[in-house]
Image: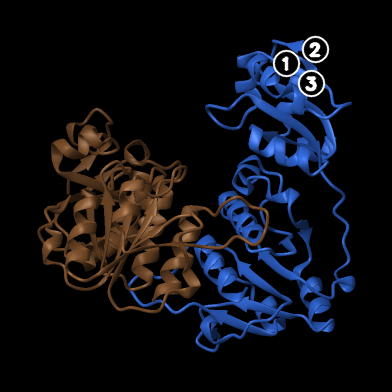
Chain colours: A brown, B blue
Amino acid sequence: MEIIKSNQNQKVKLWNSLKTAKGRKQSGTYLLDGWHSVNEAIKANASFQAIIGTEKQIEEHLSEIPHGVPAIIVSDEVANHIADTNSPQGIFAQTSIPNNSFDPKYVHNGKWLFLDSLQDPGNIGTLIRTADAAGFYGVVLGSGSTDLYNPKLIRSMQGSQFHLKVINDANLLEFTDAFIANGINVYGTSIDEKAVNYKEVTFQNDFALILGNEGNGVSQELLNKSSSNLYIPIYGKAESLNVSVAGGILIFALI
Amino acid sequence: MEIIKSNQNQKVKLWNSLKTAKGRKQSGTYLLDGWHSVNEAIKANASFQAIIGTEKQIEEHLSEIPHGVPAIIVSDEVANHIADTNSPQGIFAQTSIPNNSFDPKYVHNGKWLFLDSLQDPGNIGTLIRTADAAGFYGVVLGSGSTDLYNPKLIRSMQGSQFHLKVINDANLLEFTDAFIANGINVYGTSIDEKAVNYKEVTFQNDFALILGNEGNGVSQELLNKSSSNLYIPIYGKAESLNVSVAGGILIFALI
């Protein structure tokens, strides 16, 4: 088995480059960090370039690594170098970024989450994980959001990208038009008083929910296009809710 | 007005020490960072040792600084030094930690959130902000949780500590016993199948909700004492929900 001990090794340089959007684009791959995520990828038959780990981690998981996938042992120093966290578990996978092409014209059902220009990778990852827990069919990240394969976002998703459809860098105006044309309600979210209290919305099997940017909310263009817009009443003195929390409240109220 | 340009200044050393629990304990104070938090403290008539800012920030807010509170100008270098973030706004307040003594025997109503050994300061702050938005009366942090005045926690709270009662370093077993003795239901949360689907709980005016540690949940001792235990059904393949999201779902479902 290949053993790599130097941060100057070409493979190590490649894995380290996956922390940046540029490096991920050039190689068409991203890095999973930690056994939980690697294992979710294995269960989903993801396409791997390599599974990388310290001697201890590779030994522990050797029987679970799929046939034909190169397993590479790295030193603790290399593991710390390629990880995005301070104390990595010491097991990683270089994984293909799936082909993202998707035409919303062919969507006729399912529960969907649209994320409009969200910036915080922890919020985006947590919302994808929440949509997964709620049994949603897919999440659509509008262009202008943080890249789906950002290392912190990957950590927050906890493998949910292998459980539901996640579409990166999409045009949410097109998605909204296509869904409404196909008879699927698209709910915006807003603090405008013309919006509807979410508790007054009746259950539907198929819909999309739009959540917006941490500071500015959902764009006015999308709010104008949506079927209707929801708000969460605030009873106390806080000015607003964190977008992950607001999303969780709405997602679990609508299912 | 006093102007400080050196990180070696004794006051600067004191403000910088407030990043640690030890420094906060020694001085009985903590540091607010950013005008939003400082302004919430002013509106709540908090007790200030000083309001500290760059020349630009102090000029901008001078008319809003309460009479009798020392305003101190600092250089950008000092502002960056005492801040816990990379790009601070440049305005701070050194504020007294309020007296925390509180006897749960005298509580006969209100909506309360109990946090059992939560570790992530972002989760704790977000949950306090969410309880505030939901009009809760108070939040009780069990001992073993991250300290309430941790800088990241303070940022995530966004000033909610000035809107509702927040009790630090409390004995949650005592709180649970006292609330139940006073006829207030205390709901634990659990993924145990003996727990009750939260959607089946009927509305009550007065209750406490317990949320638990990110990895281990609510302690068994508390789950044994509670009136009943709730769970959120998972419909997809995610193993669990982020605790802030789970808390948001339960808090807004119960009100």
Q: Secondary structure at mark 2?
A: loop
Q: Chain of mark 2?
A: B
Q: Tag 3 or tag 2, which sits nearer the N-term?
A: 2
Disc assigned to residue A157? none
Residue B121: give x, y in percent of width and height: 60, 50
Q: Chain of mark 1?
A: B
Along the line of sight, which residue is nearer the eye, A182 or A25? A182
Asked if badges 2 and 1 are on one and the same chain, I answer yes
Question: Label 2, on which residue?
Answer: B2
Q: Is residue A255 left or right of residue A16?
A: right
Amino acid type, mark 2: Glu
Residue found at x 11% / y 53%: A101
Residues marked 2 and 1 touching at CB (< 8 Å)? yes
Asked if badges 1 and 3 are on one and the same chain, I answer yes
Residue A47: give x, y in percent of width and height: 14, 56
Q: Is residue B34 above or below residue B255?
A: above
Question: Label 3, on which residue?
Answer: B71
Residue found at x 57% / y 55%: B123
The answer to whether one can see residue B35 in this image is yes
Amino acid type, mark 3: Ala
Location of residue B55 by image quarter = top right
Question: Label 1, on which residue?
Answer: B73
Q: Residues within 10 Å of mark 1 (few under 14, many from 20)?
A: many
Q: Residues within 10 Å of mark 3 (few under 14, many from 20)?
A: many
Residue found at x 56% / y 66%: B247
Residues marked 1 and 3 touching at CB (< 8 Å)? yes
Along the line of sight, which residue is nearer the eye, B244 or B117? B244
